[in-house]
Image (cartoon, rainbow, N blue to C red):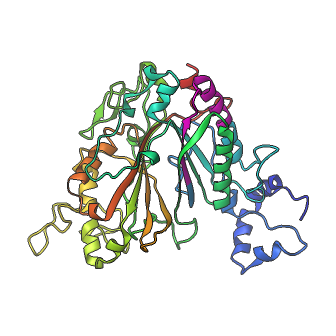
Amino acid sequence: MSGFSRRRLIGTAGAVGAAGLGVGAAGGAIARATTAEEAPTALTTVGANTVAFHGEHQAGITTPPQAHGHLIAFDLAPGAGRKEATALLRRWSGLAAELMAGRPVAADDTGVALDAGPSSLTVTFGFGRTFFDRTDLVARRPPGLDPLPAFSADRLDTRRSNGDLWVQIGADDGLVAFHALRAVQRAAGATARVRWQMTGFNRSPGATERPMTTRNLMGQVDGTNNPKPSDPDFDQRIFVPPSDAGTGTGTDGGTGTGTDAGTGGGGGDFEWLVGGSYAVVRRIRMLLDDWEGLRLAEQERIIGRRKSDGGPLTGGGETEKLALDRIGADGKPVIPANAHARISAPEQNGGAAMLRRPFSYHDGIGADGVPDAGLLFICWQADPLRGFVPVQRKLDRGDALSPFVRHESSGLFAVPGGAAKGEYVGQRLLEP
């Protein structure tokens, strides 16, 4: 087995990926190959999957959700400014490009992922509001980074909220994801220090008989009716448009001017954000003991959907449109007025839409036996003031799910567009 490099493994995976799946299903052949004196088994398609680093948009936004994720926020160190931040983004971008291609990052690579493929690894970078103060770039801070309003249900820990810089890491292998996390942290050096870090997970690829929307820790299908890249207005809703595009998602479901404070988009000093997006990040603790004590029928009334398949209580499959005006035999709406699905529906919020791409988390069980578990909620939109904010305001006023969740941390980050080859993420901001 010696002399069989990781690079060679990756190179052969595409040619024999299907065979790798067959071997994996043959009852332990892969395990035997690791102990016998024979050629190692090729990577399966899960390990061989690669996501491109360079492109119009950063990876990790429309990329299918991965099984493992890390979120980490940094603050620039005292004395560090624009020059140091520029050097850091150069290092991080070069690092991410290598990691996402499945290559070791340096001579001092930790070796955690040496025998693994890229496993759909993505590394995504964003800027918090305070980053612009620290780098003397306040004039180029987009209006979309204005602080989120306070919500009555918030119980936010400021130590685990916001930050100058934000990095999202996702991969379908836990060691690959951790390797990337450590590499990013080590590359920060003396320029930035960790403010907070969170770890999450999703269902693994291939864990179900057919591809389907993932479930959260309440057992509910989570992500139904997300905007799809095939939707004609997807880019307008999710990505910041150029100034000459002239449109962005409006609060009435129509369009708004791409250069106004609402979109935080193109025009003038904000042109660096074109092709980028805004990420709202919320750590939402689920009160699972209380939730699991409810009868199934009550859980379904609170959500407005069947737990079995995510279909609406008014009938049909998961993607069936909610029949919000349907009245039951008792004279009440079949989907209750305070049901989560009703209140968060785009048609109930002036067409407001966001791309939800969360991870679940579990941070242990307390001495009282209560699990610290829930959702690392991440949503993407061209403008948080027209995406996340109106929906959360309505949920805050009367969502039946509210007694069973607790928002414990929050962050808002401007995520620039992708880097072309030879560029680094954020170059258009830092080197205008």
Q: Quadrant location of the N terminus?
A: bottom right
Q: Residue at left 59%, top 40%?
A: 193
Q: Which residues are magenta?
A: 70-93
Quarter of the image where one finds residue 269: top left
Q: Is residue 86 magenta?
A: yes
**Count of number-bearing discs:** 0
Q: Is residue 398 left or right of residue 211?
A: left
Quarter of the image where one finds residue 368: bottom left
Q: Residue at left 28%, top 66%?
A: 303
Q: Residue at left 55%, top 19%?
A: 432
Quarter of the image where one finds residue 194: top right
Residue 304 seen = no
Q: Is residue 166 left or right of residue 280?
A: right
| Position of residue 426 measured from the top left corner of the image (x, y, whole percent) | 56, 30
| Position of residue 291 measured from the top left corner of the image (x, y, whole percent) | 33, 72
Foreground residue among 37 and 76: 76
Q: Is residue 317 magenta?
A: no
Residue 300 seen = yes
Q: Is residue 17 left or right of residue 337?
A: right
Q: Residue at left 87%, top 67%?
A: 39
| Position of residue 36 measured from the top left corner of the image (x, y, whole percent) | 87, 75
> In the displayed image of the protein, which residue is found farthest to the front?
367
